[in-house]
Image (cartoon, rainbow, N blue to C red):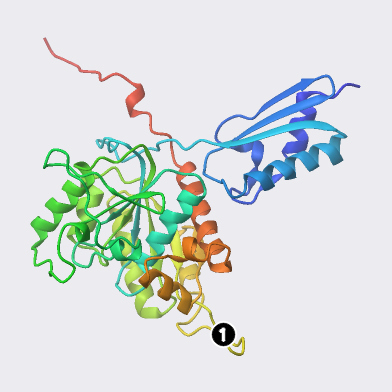
């Protein structure tokens, strides 16, 4: 009996995508199967960027077709398509931006900015168009972390900004606009105004994701972003220690109260491995972030080690994902980035632009 697309689909349904924990045939867009004599063509479209894994996915599917169905001539095409996802009611998508990801923490000193930078770079390495907005107006560190502390964004009309390019991503920070030693002595309303201007008066160029590095806490900047911007989702960065976890819970609750979906929690500065003897020690404790995730029903996105190299490379403007791209730590960042992208892909599709406005009048 001749092989049919149904047979191939049944075989593909047994192959689980480790990023989504679902069969590849359950990707956001439908798979396409064609049979021409003895040749089989399979097209899989992922809803998240996976440039570093596409070859492995293709080989995995090809091997399955060969071993399960005896297909000798298989053409497997794997692509990614990132779409804009639903935003809070009454908000419009930001011009040139499909999805906004807020990276937040309840307190400072947990490695939030380092995580945001490496997350943005990892998403770019996976094939996405990425922007990075430094919303930490009192302590803008992104210019130095990206190795462009002296760069200045262009302003073609004196009112709007063109983001700086670094490591293949678009970046904008108040740190590009003021002297590095100048303190930002601003009250809340000024912070809100500047953040809104950086968001809306910038020429973001066809971004799949805009990663926003939030200041620590739950203050004016967080409320401004939640109320003024179409935030797709937020992720919380914490360390395992109890003090950090208390504040991480507050940050998580804040985003829930303003209707921003929680993409998950990243645990930073976890296990320390001695470079001399290999002894492992959880200096700041362990299991705290996973407990928060269980308590709130959100995803645990991954844990990063307490590692000197992460700090050294970030201080040098050469973050781990680009500075040591083949390291275990860089792969952890990329795995977290894929999980974040999958969580975004699982959110509802943005459809507000597909329907006409309806006005009801009483004449």
Q: Indicate whether 288 appears above or below 299.
A: below
Q: Is residue 80 above or below residue 135?
A: above
Q: Where is residue 317 in the image (x, y as percent from the top left)?
A: 37, 66
Which one is in front, 166 or 41?
A: 166
Residue furthest front as drawn = 150
Name which quarter of the figure residue 149 lies in.
bottom left
State the residue in front, 261 or 182.
Answer: 182
Percent of width and height locating residue 85? 40, 38
| Residue sitting at the far bottom | 277
Residue 309 shown left or right of residue 35 in the figure: left
Mark 1 residue crowding within 10 angstroms, few (<14) / some (14–19) / many (20+): few
User: Which of 100/361 is in front?
Assistant: 100
Q: Where on the picture, by quarter, is residue 296?
A: bottom left
Residue 325 sits above or below residue 285 on the image: above
Residue 102: x and y in percent read 34, 54
- Residue 144 visible in the current orientation: yes
Query: Which residue is label 1 attached to?
Result: 275
Residue ID at (12%, 66%): 184
Q: The N terminus is located in which quarter?
A: top right
**Residue pushed farthest top?**
363
350 sits to left or right of 158: right
Element type at marker 1? loop
In this rendering, position of residue 175 left or right of residue 274: left
């Amino acid at each position: 009996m001749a092989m049919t697309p149904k047979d191939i689909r049944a075989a593909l349904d047994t192959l689980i995508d480790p990023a989504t924990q679902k069969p590849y045939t359950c990707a956001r867009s439908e798979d396409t199967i064609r049979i021409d004599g003895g040749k089989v063509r399979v097209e899989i479209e992922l809803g998240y960027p996976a440039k570093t894994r596409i070859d492995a996915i293709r080989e995995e599917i090809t091997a399955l077709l060969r071993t399960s169905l005896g297909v000798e001539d298989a053409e497997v095409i794997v692509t990614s398509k990132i779409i804009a996802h639903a935003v809070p009611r009454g908000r419009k998508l930001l011009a040139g931006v499909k999805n906004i990801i807020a990276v937040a923490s309840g307190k400072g000193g947990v490695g939030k900015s380092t995580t945001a930078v490496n997350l943005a770079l990892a998403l770019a390495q996976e094939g996405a168009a990425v922007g990075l907005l430094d919303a930490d107006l009192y302590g803008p560190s992104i210019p130095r972390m990206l190795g462009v502390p002296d760069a200045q964004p262009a302003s073609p009309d004196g009112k709007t900004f063109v983001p700086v390019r670094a490591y293949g991503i678009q970046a904008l920070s108040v740190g590009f606009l003021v002297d590095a030693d100048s303190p930002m002595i601003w009250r809340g309303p000024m912070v809100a105004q500047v953040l809104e201007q950086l968001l809306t008066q910038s020429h973001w160029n066809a971004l799949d994701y805009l990663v926003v590095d939030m200041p620590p806490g739950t203050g004016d900047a967080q409320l401004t972003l939640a109320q003024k911007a179409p935030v797709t989702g937020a992720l919380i960065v914490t360390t395992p220690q109890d003090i950090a976890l208390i504040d991480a819970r507050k940050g998580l609750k804040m985003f829930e109260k303003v209707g921003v979906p929680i993409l998950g929690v990243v645990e930073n500065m976890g296990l320390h491995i001695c470079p001399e003897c290999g002894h492992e020690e959880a200096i700041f404790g362990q299991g705290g972030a996973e407990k928060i995730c269980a308590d709130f029903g959100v995803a645990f996105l991954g844990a990063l080690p307490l590692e000197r190299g992460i700090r050294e490379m970030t201080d040098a403007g050469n973050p781990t994902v680009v500075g040591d791209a083949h390291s275990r730590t860089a792969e952890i960042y990329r795995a977290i980035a894929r999980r974040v992208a999958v969580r975004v892909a699982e959110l509802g599709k943005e459809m507000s632009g597909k329907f006409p406005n309806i006005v009801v009048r009483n004449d």
